[in-house]
Each structure stands twice: as C-alpha cells, then as structure tokens.
C-alpha cells in the first residue's frame, strides 16, 4: 500500500486573486519518503488542497492502491462522497478521473496535522506559497533546474511553468544501476505535463548522454529504465532540451 500525506497553504492577494502552495510526502514500500511541493494560482485553500491530492495521484505508482491523508474535511467529503459544489466538485472530479486513468485505487482519509509527515507536508506547502514568482513562459514550456551536490544523497528538482512552480526533493539511491545524476533527471521528466517542452539546466554530462542515448548505459537494468522513460516521454509529447551542464 502506498501512502501520501498532503497539505496546502493559501493567501489572498490585494487584487482579489490568490496564490497557493501545496506539499506532499509520498511513501512507497521499500523506499524512503519522497517530498514534493508546488506553487499555483488558486481561488481558495480548498483548491490548493485538492491540487495536492491530484499531484499525489499523479506521482504515486500506477495500478496500485493509494491512501491519501489530509486534515481537510471538505476535501475528504468532495473526493470520497462527492459533496461540495462549484469548483470544489470540478477539482474532485479531476482527481477521480486521474485516478481512474492511472489505475490507482484511491482512498482519502483524515489525520491531524500533528503527525510527522503531515507537519512536513505543511512546511512544504508554506514554503512553496512564499516562493518567488514564476517567469512568463508559454503553457507548453517549463524551465527545470537540477541542484545536486556529490556529497549529498538528495537532489532538488525545480520546475517552473506559467502560473505555478513545482519542486521535488529526490532521494538518490546509491545502489541503483542508474547514476544519481540521471535519477535526478528522470524525476524532472516525471513532473512534465503532456506536450510540454522541458528546458533543463544543470543536468550533468552523464545524465545528458544517457538521456540522449540510453544504450550508453553500462548495465542492462539502467538501459531498460532510461529507454522506458524516453519512450514514455515521447508518447506523451514531452521534449527535453538541455541548456547547461551541472
């Protein structure tokens, strides 16, 4: 069973619009917890909360069960029982459609914010909401920055597109057949939306070479994973362009 702990933060701007942030901690069997966050334009806090649930469904393994935990009762009622009107119902339907499309057996339940992973999700959401503004980009283009230090076991992948910013804190597996820098790049590609062009900065030479030619991977398992990621990206119309070397 996969588990996600989600939370959101929201602030109304002087012109009446709102900026929100979402955060989630994803736990899958046999892996360390993964942390994700994003900034978005949102009409209220519930919309940001539902975006966190949607991202959990998108990021969790497909064709498996997923339990999403939140402290927001309106979100639980909207997703689990179809309650709520207006944009809340529309966003809840988007969550359920995404779960159906990915074969995710979704369950949404309550836990208090005092739980450890909920506290992490809350901090991620607040940090995302307070983040800097996004650059003016076309809807089909996103700017990606990969920050990785050799001495650390985690990479930070930041993706900015029009109206939002998404950040993934990627735990790097030193025992994987895929080099750590390529693991960070694959995490960046997984954040892309269909038809999006990723402008990737600071990807290592190794990661660039393996993405462009997966057959260069020395180990069969790494070759298979990289090739599968390339094929999935191409099937979704996702393009990757490298703008600098990390």
Image (spheres, helix red, strand yellow):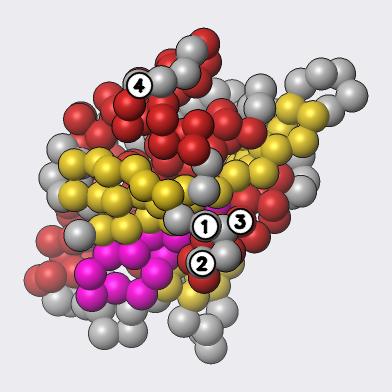
Dot in front, 3 or 2: 2
Q: Which mark is residue 112?
A: 1
* Magenta-highlighted residues: 22-35
Disc 2: which residue: 115
The picture quadrant where one finds residue 219 is: bottom left
Tell me whether circle 1 and circle 2 mark residues in contact (CB < 8 Å): yes
Disc 3: which residue: 122
Mark 4 or mark 3: name the one nearer the start of the chain: 4
The picture quadrant where one finds residue 1 is: bottom left
Nearer to me, 220 or 2:
2
Disc 4: which residue: 82
Q: Position of residue 71 (x, y in %)?
A: 52, 48
Taking the view exactly as shown, the residue that stands out farthest to the right is 14
112 to the left or right of 100: right
Label 1 CA crowd tier, 10 Å (few <14, some 14–19, many 20+): few
Magenta segment includes 30? yes
> Looking at the picture, does residue 197 appear above or below residue 152?
above
CA separation, marks 4 and 3? 25 Å
Q: What secondary structure is found at the residue carrying circle 3? A: helix
Nearer to me, 25 or 88:
88
Quarter in which the C terminus is drawn:
bottom right
> Looking at the picture, does residue 117 appear above or below residue 236?
below
Label 4 CA crowd tier, 10 Å (few <14, some 14–19, many 20+): some
Dot in front, 3 or 1: 1
């Amino acid at each position: 069973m996969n588990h996600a702990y989600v939370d959101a933060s929201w602030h109304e701007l002087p012109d009446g619009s709102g900026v929100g942030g979402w955060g989630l901690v994803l736990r899958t069997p046999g892996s360390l917890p993964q942390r994700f966050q994003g900034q978005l334009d949102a009409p209220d806090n519930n919309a940001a909360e539902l975006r966190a649930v949607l991202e959990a469904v998108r990021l969790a393994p497909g064709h498996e069960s997923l339990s999403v935990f939140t402290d927001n009762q309106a979100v639980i009622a909207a997703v689990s029982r179809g309650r709520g009107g207006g944009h809340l119902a529309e966003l809840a339907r988007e969550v359920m459609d995404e779960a159906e499309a990915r074969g995710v057996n979704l369950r949404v339940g309550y836990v208090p914010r005092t739980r450890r992973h909920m506290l992490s999700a809350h901090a991620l959401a607040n940090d995302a909401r307070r983040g800097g503004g996004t650059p003016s980009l076309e809807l089909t283009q996103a700017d990606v920055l990969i920050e990785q230090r050799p001495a650390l076991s985690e990479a930070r992948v930041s993706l900015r597109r029009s109206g939002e910013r998404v950040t993934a804190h990627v735990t790097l597996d030193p025992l994987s057949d895929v080099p750590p820098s390529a693991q960070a790049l694959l995490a960046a590609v997984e954040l892309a939306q269909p038809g999006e062009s990723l402008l990737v900065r600071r990807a290592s030479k190794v990661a660039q070479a393996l993405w462009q030619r997966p057959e260069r991977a020395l180990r069969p398992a790494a070759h298979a994973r990289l090739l599968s990621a390339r094929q999935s990206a191409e099937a979704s119309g996702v393009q990757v362009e490298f703008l600098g070397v990390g």
